[in-house]
């Protein structure tokens, strides 16, 4: 096992592991350490079945079954299919997943610990991969906040709403997303989390708010909340906090959600096919939000 940092604010490659087999205890410990240090980990040249992917991800915590309850691996609902491929007139996966800055499951009482994505088909143009996944470090973003703002916001909470991101994606041209049903809305009501969290792997403070799901700071008047959130959204996506990951076929990409936000870049056409399978690890093993 070899850990190769990107040299950027986030990211490392881990070579020498076969994720189709259970991780030995020492390797598991090293992966967790690397996840804390680099937040975004690439495991190249993996060959996984849906069950392999589920079993690998489940070593890090309970797995979520997405509230949309669609585009799942047959017989393995914990594996969600992300794809722009259409077969027999029907999409085989969710085509517009994650296409704006957010962190997964901040809208849930039990937040997300990590994502595990497996790249099966990656679009290319002129020899270069398309559809990168971009990240921002929320540990770096917290550190870079003005001291007086840290002090003022300390102890405050942010309301997160699943429907905010869903409706934003529905407004995009060509979106096939239906509105959430009443049952889906009730399954994911808005929830609040501290605006600053202590990262479970590093012990450092992180900014836990994101443009995709955060709707207001509960302790502030509406106008001040809106202005403060807008400042935070602009601050947390500054270039110095960013890392862009370029996909390759058979990559497994794992990132921790508590200290990052991410954005899937849709710079490929409908005839440039992308197929990625996703597992969402809930924060049941390493972290429980207050």
Image (tube, rainbow, N blue to C red):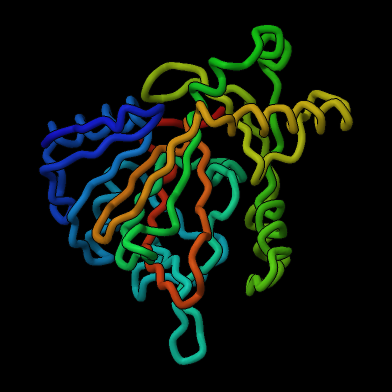
Q: Position of residue 109 (x, y in %)?
A: 58, 41
Q: Is residue 43 above or below residue 96?
A: above
Residue at 44% from the left image edge and 86% from the top image edge: 87
Q: Quadrant of the N terminus?
A: top left
Work out which residue is located at the far bottom of the displayed protein and give it. 88
Residue at 83% from the left image edge and 24% from the top image edge: 220
Residue at 16% from the left image edge and 56% from the top image edge: 20
Q: Is residue 10 above or below residue 182?
A: above
Residue at 38% from the left image edge and 45% from the top image edge: 245
Work out which residue is located at the far front of the displayed protein and give it. 126
Residue nearest the observer in this picture, 203 or 77: 203
Q: Is residue 283 visible?
A: no
* Quadrant position of residue 123: bottom left
- Left or right of 113 in this view: 104: right
- Left or right of 161 in this view: 112: left
Q: Is residue 176 above or below residue 161?
A: below
Residue nearest the observer in this picture, 192 or 115: 115
Q: Is residue 63 visible?
A: yes
Q: Position of residue 93 (x, y in %)?
A: 46, 72
Q: Position of residue 75 (x, y in %)?
A: 34, 73
């Amino acid at each position: 096992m070899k850990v190769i940092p990107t040299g950027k604010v986030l990211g490392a490659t881990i070579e020498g592991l076969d994720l189709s087999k259970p991780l030995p205890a020492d390797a598991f410990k090293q992966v967790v350490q690397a996840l804390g240090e680099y937040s975004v980990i690439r495991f190249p040249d993996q060959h996984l079945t849906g069950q392999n992917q589920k079993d690998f991800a489940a070593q890090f915590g309970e797995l979520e079954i997405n509230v949309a309850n669609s585009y799942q691996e047959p017989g393995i609902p914990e594996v969600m299919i992300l794809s722009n491929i259409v077969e027999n007139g029907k999409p085989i996966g969710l085509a517009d997943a994650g296409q704006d800055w957010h962190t997964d499951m901040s809208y849930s009482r039990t937040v997300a610990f990590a994502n595990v994505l497996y790249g099966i088909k990656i679009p290319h143009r002129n020899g270069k991969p398309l559809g990168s996944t971009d990240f921002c470090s929320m540990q770096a973003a917290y550190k870079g906040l003005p001291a007086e703002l840290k002090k003022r916001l300390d102890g405050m909470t942010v309301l997160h709403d699943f429907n905010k991101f869903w409706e934003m994606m529905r407004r995009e041209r060509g979106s096939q997303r239906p509105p959430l049903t009443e049952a889906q809305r009730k399954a994911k009501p808005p929830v609040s989390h501290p605006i600053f969290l202590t990262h479970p792997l590093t012990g450092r403070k992180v900014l836990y708010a994101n443009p995709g799901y955060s709707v207001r700071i509960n302790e502030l008047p509406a106008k001040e909340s809106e202005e403060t959130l807008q400042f935070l959204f602009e601050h947390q996506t500054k270039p110095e906090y960013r890392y862009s990951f370029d996909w390759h076929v058979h990559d497994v990409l794992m990132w921790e959600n508590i200290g990052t936000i991410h954005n899937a870049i849709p710079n490929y056409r409908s005839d440039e096919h992308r197929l990625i399978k996703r597992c969402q690890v809930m924060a049941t093993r390493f972290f429980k939000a207050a």
